[in-house]
Image: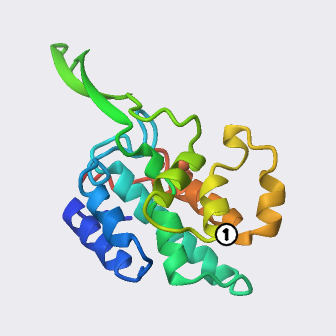
Amino acid sequence: MSRITRQEQQARFWDLLSAVERTGMDKLIEWLNKTDYFTAPASSKHHGDYEGGLLEHSLNVYDEFNRLRSAYPEYPVSEETAVIITLFHDLCKVNFYATEKRNRKNADGQWEQYDFYTIKEKFCYGGHGSKSVFLLQNFIQLTPEEAVAINCHMGAWDGNKDVGNAYEHYPVAWMLHVADEAATFLTESEATRSDGETV
Ligand SMILES: [Fe+2]
Ligand SMILES: [Fe+2]
């Protein structure tokens, strides 16, 4: 699977966002441009643990979500909702990571410094999906299904015992959860990726 450049990812992001006409998007975009959304990693040491990893992951989730939309046409999802919940499900990771210098031996046995991502939370909300919902709702009004989908996108990974009920009532929430896992464990997995390219 070939990967597109970071510039192409950003162009794709803006293109997708043009489908969203919700009140407050201008304020959300103004805020986004002041954050590290476009340069942040998706994690500190797992999937997308490199500059731009969060944007790449968000686009991958959009793609996986679209595959599920095609597989389950009986559960229609508007393009606006698809874009909002996929591109912003991990908004909680904005202004969340920092880099620090660490030492390691290179292939020649020489010590070298490298940048290592660490978590340096600047807004300790106390939740993952819930924090993304809160940040989004500072700017735009989410529909109930969008809020549930983003809040429950981690499934049982973050100890949410009511997630099954949420998925039964809001199939789009289950679809976002599965899309997030597919992007993380399939598309972005070092174990299954074979292209070896970096962006
Ligand atoms: Fe997440
Ligand atoms: Fe995610």
Q: How is the image coloured?
A: rainbow
Query: Residue 3's image quarter?
Result: bottom left
Residue 118, image x, y percentages? 37, 27
Q: Is residue 72 above or below residue 110?
A: below
Report if residue 107 is visible in the image.
Answer: no
Along the horizontal axis of the image, is 75 left or right of 40? Answer: right
The reply to whether residue 167 is visible in this rendering is: yes
Residue shown at the point (51%, 82%) measured from the top left = 79
Q: Nearer the viewer, residue 79 or 112?
A: 79
Q: Amino acid at mark 1?
A: Glu
Give the residue at mark 1.
145
Q: Quadrant of residue 174?
A: bottom right
Location of the N terminus by quadrant is bottom left
Q: Is residue 2 above or below residue 151?
A: below
Q: Residue 80 versus residue 67: which sits nearer the camera?
A: 80
- Spot occupied by residue 62 in the image (x, y as percentages of width and height): 48, 69
- Is 53 on the left or on the right of 178, as rendered? left
Left or right: 141 in relation to 167: left
Q: Position of residue 133 (x, y in %)?
A: 55, 55
Q: Which one is nearer the viewer's eye here, 24 or 162?
A: 24
Q: Is residue 152 left or right of residue 111?
A: right
- Crowd class of label 1 (few under 14; some 14 to 19; many from 20; radius 10 Å): some
Figure disc tally: 1
Q: Residue 34 appears at what percent x and percent y? A: 24, 52
Foreground residue among 127 and 13: 127
